[in-house]
Image (spheres, coloured by chain):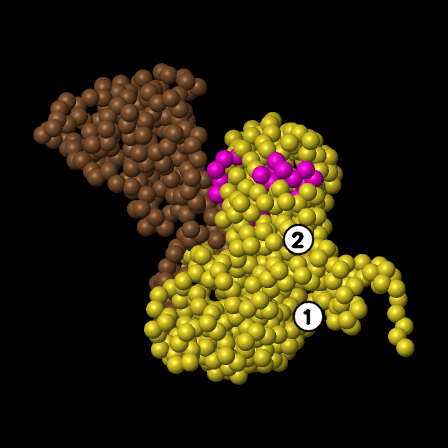
């Protein structure tokens, strides 16, 4: 039995930042294609930006700082450049049905499906915002034990804030290493990151199985 | 009666003297030598951009062709220097653009460069040849586009480890078809994909290209195409070293590599797929330099490579190499001069790999020419350090980082004073030392007494009292750079050694026990030092003199207090309340 809850459309990028993930590289902005972002890179901050353990008390009495207990600023002395370069990248293309071009995101930037969901929604909203105003769009979360299936459902509201009719549903699908199209959310997150080759937000007013069938029938090159 | 050579003869003699120290010494001999020397000096090195001003440099050396500047303190690499600290290139390039129209080379390290600055470089210097930006920031690929487009005789563009705002890969396409002078290109720090055909064409029309460091976005499948165009390469940095495992692609790559008869250095190797490693085997025997420090490959794969490199002089690697790999290294690479082992998982206290002090001991035993060591590990003992010291008295750089702060000798649970003491006693030419582990004031006594050639010392979480710092400042005759964090060093040692600080380039102390009042007194006593207190809590003006400072950076200067300090940095000479 699925239930729907609506979620605040906020910039979930800050959540990722709290996890110490650097999303600057894939930060999504609503701009015209090809337009320069026109802003400076985020400040040079380490992956773990924390206060120094120092206090005003006598240093010699300070207990042995353990790596497990607290992370020290700038310790161990591995250059920031090196930390950034050592990060893995898992760029996958994201296609939204009806959109004129694709986007690319780095799956390694996200820690779980929640964060991915938010980024996918931003992409979705970007491409569909022409049809609906951002007030009309509501992120509907059809929750099942694993991830969501019919994730993005544009809902129109009348002036009394009653939802009118549900229109088209978008389904988050991904192609795995074997070439099969799967529902986003079926497998554990880490496995998903390792096996996902591309993502598609497929417009479907039908149920999931039809969506799956449709996708496996379409050739890879047309996606 | 003064016998002297004609000026032209002296000038000719001086032209053979290239080291900065020697030229500085020459200029001190007498007034006429000073004059002759300053007119024929072509290369200037400024180790601290705030020690001197652009105007002073230009006034003294009017005919310079090459300038090298360093900005932020070394600890900026580890995020200990707040953003906005300084190190701006623009004021320098502004004045140089007027004074040095024939400037050819600019080398910057840890400076804040801007697109405006790069544009000015590209337009003001008609014969500009070399741009090296090492660990710099503040500019974007637009600035690079200006350099590519306007510098007709560009020989070298090296962006090593800089943080660049990567707007797109289009900048590379700005190199005009007429540009054929490129000898060195390092774009490894950029993430955007450049146009492959533009890159290919650029390489094809650069017959003198010797160094090419690609960025991660250049796919492995296309590497062989590039290598075919540049078989004369001496140093190559690959892009991402992964692709679907296809034997034909691998054999193409292997064949392309085998054509590069001059290849001596390899780097890159991000996202390595071991299937493709054999492609480099044919060049291994010629390699003198190998950087696998981004390659997350396990010990057997790493070992297989290094054991095929008998001429290796410099190796950078992750701790995946493990003790077994280092042992193999010590048996195979007898010409090794420099070893750097980085941690694969620095934030985990438990070892994820089997790399211990034994690996380093083995290398110290087998590699007779080993001079320079950077080693991250999780355990160390006094006996291992003593063994290493006795094996390798020719060490000139020893940087050991035991990941856990204040970790003792894991065998005896004692401090590591004796081990490091052995290092400084045996390695009489030691110029650079980084300490770690549990250390008392005693180690500093040893260092002060024995490390007479030591120029740079890094200390963290060590010592018991001011005595430790005093030993170093009063004993190390050659000390130029001292950087300290989280040590119980304070006012007494600092104020007892004020004159020493003017013989050094700089002193950094953060999270120590230095008081605001001591900083003011130091500044009062030594007017030719900039005593800069960095404190982000925002209430420096109202704090009592007894309160500790967060961070202190002291450096000698002939340029006076700098004018570009952000609000969280104060020069103690300008402190309005210092008379309090």
Q: Position of residue B226 (x, y in %)?
A: 64, 32
Task: Look at the picture and state if A56 lies above or below A144.
Answer: below
Q: Position of residue B39 (x, y in %)?
A: 76, 60
**Quick check: is B528 in the magenta stretch?**
no
- Is there CB contact under 8 Å for labels 2 and 1? no
**Quick check: is B168 in the magenta stretch?**
yes
What residue would you read off at disc 1?
B429
Query: What residue appears at the point 68 percent right and 34 percent down from the top-left corner?
Result: B179
Q: Which quadrant: the C terminus of chain B?
A: bottom left
Badge 2 and badge 1 in a common chain: yes
Q: Nearer the viewer, mark 2 or mark 1?
A: 2
Query: What residue appears at the point 38 percent right and 56 percent down from the top-left corner?
Result: A49
Quote the CA–CA distance across marks 2 and 1: 40 Å
The answer to whether residue A109 of the structure is visible from this angle is yes
What hue does chain B carry in this figure? yellow
Q: Which label sits on residue B303?
A: none
Query: What residue appears at the point 59 percent right and 33 percent down from the top-left corner?
Result: B174
- Give the image quarter of residue B177: top right
Q: Chain of mark 2?
A: B
Viewer-closest of A20 and B257: A20
Viewer-closest of B174 and A156: B174
Give the mark nearest the N terminus, 2 or 1.
2
Viewer-closest of B436 and B384: B436
What residue would you read off at disc 2?
B99
Look at the image and give the residue range highlighted in magenta: B146-169
């Amino acid at each position: 039995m699925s239930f729907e809850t609506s979620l605040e459309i906020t910039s979930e990028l800050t959540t990722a930042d709290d996890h110490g993930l650097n999303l600057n590289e894939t930060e999504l902005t609503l701009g015209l294609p090809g337009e320069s972002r026109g802003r400076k890179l985020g400040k040079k901050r380490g992956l773990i930006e924390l206060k120094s353990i120092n206090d005003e008390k006598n240093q010699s009495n300070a207990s042995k700082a353990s790596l497990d207990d607290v992370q020290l600023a700038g310790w161990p002395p591995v250059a920031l450049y090196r930390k950034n370069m050592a990060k893995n990248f898992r760029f996958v293309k994201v296609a939204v049905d009806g959109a004129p071009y694709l986007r690319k995101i780095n799956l390694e930037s996200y820690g779980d499906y929640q964060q991915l969901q938010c980024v996918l929604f931003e992409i979705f909203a970007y491409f569909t915002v022409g049809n609906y105003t951002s007030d009309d769009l509501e992120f509907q979360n059809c929750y099942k034990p694993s991830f969501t299936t019919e994730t993005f459902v544009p809902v129109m509201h009348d002036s009394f804030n009653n939802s009118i009719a549900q229109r088209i549903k978008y389904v988050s699908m991904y192609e795995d290493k074997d070439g099969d199209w799967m529902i986003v959310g079926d497998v554990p997150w880490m496995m998903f990151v390792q096996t996902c080759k591309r993502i598609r937000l497929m417009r479907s007013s039908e149920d999931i199985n039809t969506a799956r069938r449709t996708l496996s029938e379409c050739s890879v090159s047309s996606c | 009666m003064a016998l002297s050579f004609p000026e032209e003869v002296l000038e000719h003699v001086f032209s053979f003297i290239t080291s900065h120290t020697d030229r500085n010494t020459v200029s001190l001999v007498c007034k006429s030598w000073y004059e002759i020397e300053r007119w024929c000096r072509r290369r200037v090195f400024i180790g601290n951009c705030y020690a001197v001003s652009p105007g002073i440099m230009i006034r003294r050396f009017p005919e310079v062709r090459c300038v090298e500047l360093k900005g932020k303190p070394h600890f900026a690499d580890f995020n200990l220097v707040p953003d906005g600290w300084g190190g701006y290139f623009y004021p320098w390039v502004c004045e140089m653009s007027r004074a040095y129209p024939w400037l050819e080379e600019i080398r910057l390290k840890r400076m804040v460069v801007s697109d405006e600055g790069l544009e000015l470089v590209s337009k003001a210097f008609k014969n500009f040849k070399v741009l090296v930006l090492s660990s710099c920031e503040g500019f974007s690929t637009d600035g690079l586009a200006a350099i590519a487009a306007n510098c007709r005789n560009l020989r070298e563009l090296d962006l090593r480890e800089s943080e660049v705002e990567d707007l797109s890969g289009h900048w590379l396409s700005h190199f005009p078809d007429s540009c054929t002078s490129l000898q060195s290109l390092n774009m490894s720090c950029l993430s955007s994909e450049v146009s492959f055909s533009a890159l290919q064409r650029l390489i094809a029309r650069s017959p003198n290209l010797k160094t090419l460091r690609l960025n991660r976005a250049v796919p492995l499948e296309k590497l062989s195409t590039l290598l075919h165009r540049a078989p004369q390469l001496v140093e190559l940095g690959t892009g991402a070293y992964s692709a679907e495992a296809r034997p034909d692609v691998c054999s193409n790559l292997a064949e392309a590599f085998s054509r590069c008869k001059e290849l001596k250095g390899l780097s890159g190797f991000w996202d390595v797929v071991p299937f493709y490693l054999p492609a480099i085997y044919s060049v291994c025997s010629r390699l003198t330099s190998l950087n696998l420090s981004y390659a997350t490959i396990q010990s057997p794969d790493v070992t297989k490579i290094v054991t095929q490199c008998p001429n290796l002089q410099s190796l950078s690697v992750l701790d995946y190499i493990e003790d077994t790999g280092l042992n193999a290294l010590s048996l195979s690479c007898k010409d090794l001069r420099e070893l750097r082992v980085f941690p694969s998982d620095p934030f985990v206290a438990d070892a994820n790999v089997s790399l211990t002090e034994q690996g380093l001991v083995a290398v110290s035993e087998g590699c007779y020419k080993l001079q320079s060591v950077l080693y991250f590990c999780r355990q160390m003992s006094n006996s291992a350090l003593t063994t290493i010291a006795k094996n390798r008295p020719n060490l000139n750089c020893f940087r050991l980082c035991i990941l856990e702060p204040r970790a003792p000798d894991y065998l005896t649970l004692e401090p590591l004073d004796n081990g490091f003491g052995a290092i400084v006693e045996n390695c009489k030419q030691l110029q650079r030392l980084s300490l770690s582990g549990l250390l008392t004031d005693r180690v500093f006594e040893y260092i002060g007494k024995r490390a007479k050639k030591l120029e740079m010392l890094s200390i963290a979480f060590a010592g018991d009292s001011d005595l430790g710092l005093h030993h170093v400042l009063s004993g190390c005759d050659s000390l130029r750079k001292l950087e300290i964090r989280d040590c119980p060093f304070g006012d007494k040692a600092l104020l007892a050694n004020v004159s020493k600080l003017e013989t050094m380039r700089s002193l950094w102390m953060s999270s120590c026990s230095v008081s605001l009042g001591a900083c003011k007194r130091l500044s009062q006593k030594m007017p030719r030092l900039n005593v800069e207190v960095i404190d982000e809590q925002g209430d420096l003006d109202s704090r009592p003199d007894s309160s500790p400072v967060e961070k202190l950076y002291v450096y000698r200067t002939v340029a006076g207090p700098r004018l570009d300090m952000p609000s969280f940095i104060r020069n103690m000479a300008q402190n309005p309340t210092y008379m309090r």
